[in-house]
Amino acid sequence: MSKKFINHLSKTLAEIENDGLTKFERPIHSPQGARVQVGKEDLDQGSVLNLCANNYLGLANHRDLKAAARTGLEEYGFGMASVRFICGTQDIHLQLERRLATLLNKDDAILFAACFDANGGLFEPLLGANDGIVSDALNHASIIDGIRLCKAKRYRYANSDMQDLEKQLKQAREDGAFNLMIATDGVFSMDGYLAKLPDIVDLAKRYDAMVMVDDCHATGFMGPKGAGTPAHFGVDVDILTGTLGKALGGAIGGYIAGPQVVIDLLRQRARPYLFSNSLPPMVVKAGLAALDLIEGSDELRQQLFTNTKYWRSGLQSLGFELQPGEHPIVPVMLGEAQLAQDMATDLFKRGVYVSGFFYPVVPMGQARIRTQMNAALTIDELDFALNAFEQVGKKIGVLS
Ligand SMILES: *Cc1c(COP(=O)(O)O)cnc(C)c1O
């Protein structure tokens, strides 16, 4: 590689560091869970409470999922060494697609290696140059990239701003869009806010648009049976995308669920589906086990929301400023980036693992610590974490 190019990359890295935007990865020496082992060099006790995983239902190390993964490994082998359409489809892949479609009340579903790929492959086969996509400004990077790969005309509306959405829909209609699609996250993960689906669906009807919802931070626990944000609001949307990498076990895998023709066409045309490997049997079997747990009982969801309420009201009575809401994402608002970083560092030393978020991930002056609840946390653990938040909040002057 030329010296010139290496210098160019080094300069970019230096800029990232100078801006204080370098991301560090902290090695964990245990399975994912309510409590994780970190390096002895990090911490005296070596273990911390984890309040920053997307492990909403605590399934990432659940015995049923591990048993199912073992069965998958023994009965179906380690890998498929093929894309789906050549020789990479086992009966269990079809079962999982069927089960996801049933949970989400759609005709069919199609698996991808990740939801990033599902969103990356969704738009281009469905919409062309004469069509339009109206997208929420805070949508996940994978939706933004998926839309970029598609020839449809792009319209962006301010986050959850229904007046702006209507303005953009009007504009798209004036521009002569043939087919029109609204794309939104079901839950905006920096704030834990839900998309205003009833209003969105209503506007979609009025402007003859379809609605696509990415429900990565909702499927499995929001709404009756964990069917996600449309079920939560009691509305119907056209297309749902989601992940096996969060509440449904936390490993890997994504999917799209929708009308039969949509899924049939995606199997023919979605590039990340056609040109990327089939999901490994262990992951597929564990996904089926996750759906068994999710559909079989409300227990884990109830525990998650009991924990969420306890945590939210605990932080509130200590005097912290929170983003309002009901989702297990509970952001503690701090304002300045340095404050969020100092607080996260101090909490970690006291055995509570949280992550600070600041510009450019969130708007300038709205730095925060994003906490996330899960069903595996106990009330004692939450009390321990509340105590740590109180100590640190007082020490750094956020609480009086
Ligand atoms: C996590 C997430 C994704 C990516 O999912 P993967 O399966 O990890 O690729 C896509 N969209 C949203 C809204 C997410 O939160």
Image (cartoon, rainbow, N blue to C red):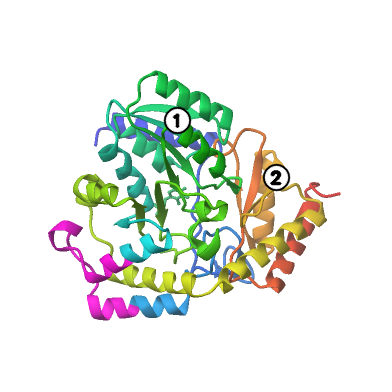
Determine if residue 398 is in view: yes
Cα–Cα span, label 2 and label 1: 37 Å
Q: Position of residue 270 (x, y in %)?
A: 24, 46
Q: Nearer the viewer, residue 263 or 323?
A: 263
Q: Quadrant of residue 120?
A: top left
Q: Position of residue 22 (x, y in %)?
A: 50, 42
What residue is drawn where x is 67% and y is 46%? 340
Q: Quadrant of residue 10?
A: top left
Q: Position of residue 227 (x, y in %)?
A: 48, 60
What range of the chain is rendered magenta? 70-96
Q: Nearer the viewer, residue 183 or 69?
A: 183
| Dot 2 amino acid type | Met
Q: Main secondary structure of the magenta part?
A: helix
Query: Mark 2: which secondary structure?
Result: strand
Residue 95 highlighted magenta (yes or no): yes
Residue denoted by label 2: 333
User: Total of numbered circles in the picture?
Assistant: 2
| Dot 1 amino acid type | Tyr
**Circle nearer the viewer, 2 or 1:** 1
Q: Nearer the viewer, residue 345 or 106?
A: 106
Determine if residue 48 is in view: no
Which residue extends farthest front? 206
Q: Which mark is residue 207?
A: 1
Q: Position of residue 224 (x, y in %)?
A: 54, 62
Please tell me whether residue 120 is drawn above or below residue 278 in the rendered image. above
Residue 194 highlighted magenta (yes or no): no
The N terminus, quarter of image: top left
- Whether residue 29 sits left or right of residue 324 in the image: it is left
Query: Mark 1: which secondary structure?
Result: loop
Q: Residues within 10 Å of mark 1 (few under 14, many from 20)?
A: some
- Whether residue 347 sits left or right of residue 175 in the image: it is right
